[in-house]
Image: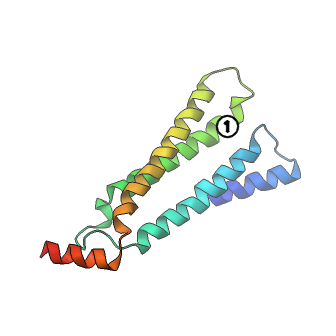
């Protein structure tokens, strides 16, 4: 919800020219699409696909937590660094932007690692249950 509000405020500022700074459009789209929509999709898909084991609790889903952490750290770094990349001569902003891209990629990778084993057919699931008995 926080990213939605940030995207909403950035979108309003962009349309009204009330608060213009460089690179406001990429910030708007990153906050909306990665911060809001992608995280909703990821959360619902982790919730909807059954866990690997019944004993596996929410706290033990380390790849989901890592995905959440990496994606949010990357987005926050992006929101901080993006406005200063073209306006400042300091290289730290460019490094932060690269680090944000890497952490966002790691977040998506952790999500895939968490979800991929869950995406199996009913036939494969039955085979796994029979093999574990």
Number of marks = 1
Q: Residue at x 39, y 51 (%)?
A: 66
| In the rendered image, the vertical position of residue 53 relative to residue 83, given as above or below | below
Residue occupied by mark 1: 82
Q: Quadrant of residue 96?
A: top right
SS at mark 1 in the image: helix
Quadrant location of the C terminus? bottom left
Q: Quadrant of residue 92?
A: top right
From where the camera sits, is residue 79 visible?
A: yes
From where the camera sits, is residue 2 visible?
A: no
Q: Position of residue 122 (x, y in %)?
A: 33, 79
Q: Position of residue 72 (x, y in %)?
A: 51, 49
Q: Residue at x 63, y 42 (%)?
A: 79
| In the rendered image, the vertical position of residue 57 relative to residue 84, given as above or below | below
Q: Residue at x 50, y 45 (%)?
A: 105
Q: Position of residue 117 (x, y in %)?
A: 33, 63
């Amino acid at each position: 919800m926080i990213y939605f509000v940030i995207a909403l405020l950035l979108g309003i500022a962009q349309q009204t020219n009330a608060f213009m700074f460089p690179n406001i459009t990429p910030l708007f789209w990153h906050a909306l699409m990665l911060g809001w929509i992608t995280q909703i999709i990821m959360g619902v898909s982790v919730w909807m696909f059954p866990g690997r084991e019944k004993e596996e609790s929410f706290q033990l889903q380390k790849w989901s937590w890592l995905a959440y952490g990496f994606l949010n750290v990357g987005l926050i770094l992006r929101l901080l660094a993006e406005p200063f990349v073209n306006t400042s001569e300091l290289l730290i902003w460019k490094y932060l932007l690269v680090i944000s891209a890497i952490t966002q990629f790691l977040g998506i990778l952790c999500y895939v690692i968490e979800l991929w084993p869950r995406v199996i057919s009913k036939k494969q699931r039955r085979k796994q249950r029979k093999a574990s008995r």
